[in-house]
Image (tube, helix red, strand yellow):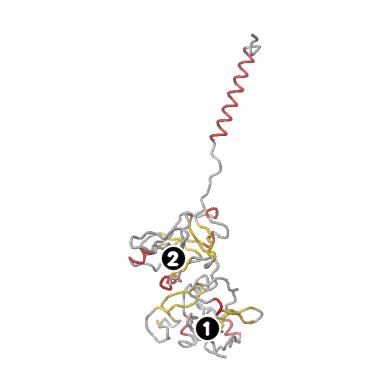
Amino acid sequence: MKPLFKSKAFAFLFSLAVLAGLIVSCDDNDSPGPNKVTTQIKLATSSTLGSYLVDSAGYTLYFFTRDADGTNNCTSGNCMAAWPIYYKANLTQEMLGEGLLLADFAEITTASGAKQLTYKGWPLYYYSPTANSVKELPGETKGEGVGGVWYVAKTDYTIMLASKQLVGQDGKNYKSDYTEGTGVTQFFTDGKGRTLYTFTTDSKNTTSCTSSGCKAAWPAFTETLASVPSALDKSLFGTIDVDGKKQLTYKGWPLYYFTQDSGRGMTKGVSVPSPGVWPVAIKDAVEAPN
């Protein structure tokens, strides 16, 4: 029988080569691959609601119209039990699904000291419809429209709803009829919570805010209509041509911002130049006159 190796030196070198190969092989197999990042927030799609935000497990996320100012106003025990806050620490772009941008997310601290994530300034919540605070199932959107104040979180709201006390530039509280007093009024905002107004001197699909001073104080709302809350009839919105742009209208009323509203949900315009001349835009507005 012929020896496998011709010399001890060759056998030794061969053994070293085999050992080195085993070491390299073990290193290759044992070294961790790239860390997989779990998608924490993504978009789901409904045939009736379109695209909306869900968490990693598919639980629907919601906006609260009373949070138009960017703070958590779901502070009662019953509210907190039915609408648990959503929070994910150290969110990165890699944790977001297609179509979502990290710049649109931020975090706030609630009155109870808890952390909560926001999207475009709107605090995010789950919905727990049962008495024992069990969340609705992944893929369910039973919280849509609850109480007329809860809506699925969407990326493309052109119009959103705010439910707040009206406070004029004069610092006074106003009710929905623009008499002084306290009470919640629901009104239109843009997708980032900035209040929208109508002008009582306008007529159907016609603006009377034509002077340079008026236009400077009351800029036309010219966003292209995408999503609106399900409580609103999208067919009631339209556009008019103003200064080469398309101004959005509702029931024939042109829609405007007020430049003195420096923050989300502010309603300073309701007292300018006197209460009710520039009312906030509301769902149940009468049709603009011809």
Name the element at disc 2: loop
Question: Counting other residues with Cα less than 10 Å from the Cα at mark 2, is it few (<14), some (14-19), or many (20 or more)?
Answer: some
Near-viewer residue (221 or 41): 41
Identity of the residue furthest to the top in this view: 1
| Extreme residue toward the front, this view | 47
The disc labelled 1 sits on which kind of residue?
A: Thr
**Relative to 157, does residue 217 appear above or below in the rendering?**
below
- When the figure is inspected, residue 79 is found, relative to residue 98, above or below; the finding is below
Q: Is residue 207 above or below residue 55?
A: below
Q: Which residue lies under the disc numbered 1?
A: 198
Mark seen at residue 80 = none
Residue nearest the viewer, comparing 177 with 290? 290
Where's residue 72, x and y in %? 41, 66
Q: Nearer the viewer, mark 2 or mark 1?
A: 2
Tell me residue 105's x, y (percent): 50, 61
Q: CA distance from mark 2 to mark 1?
A: 32 Å
Residue 115, quarter of picture: bottom left
Classify residue 170 by image quadrant. Answer: bottom left
Q: Position of residue 241 (x, y in %)?
A: 64, 82
- Whether residues under marks 2 and 1 lie with C-beta atoms below 8 angstroms apart, the answer is no
What residue type is disc 2 on?
Lys
Q: Pointer 2: what residue?
A: 142
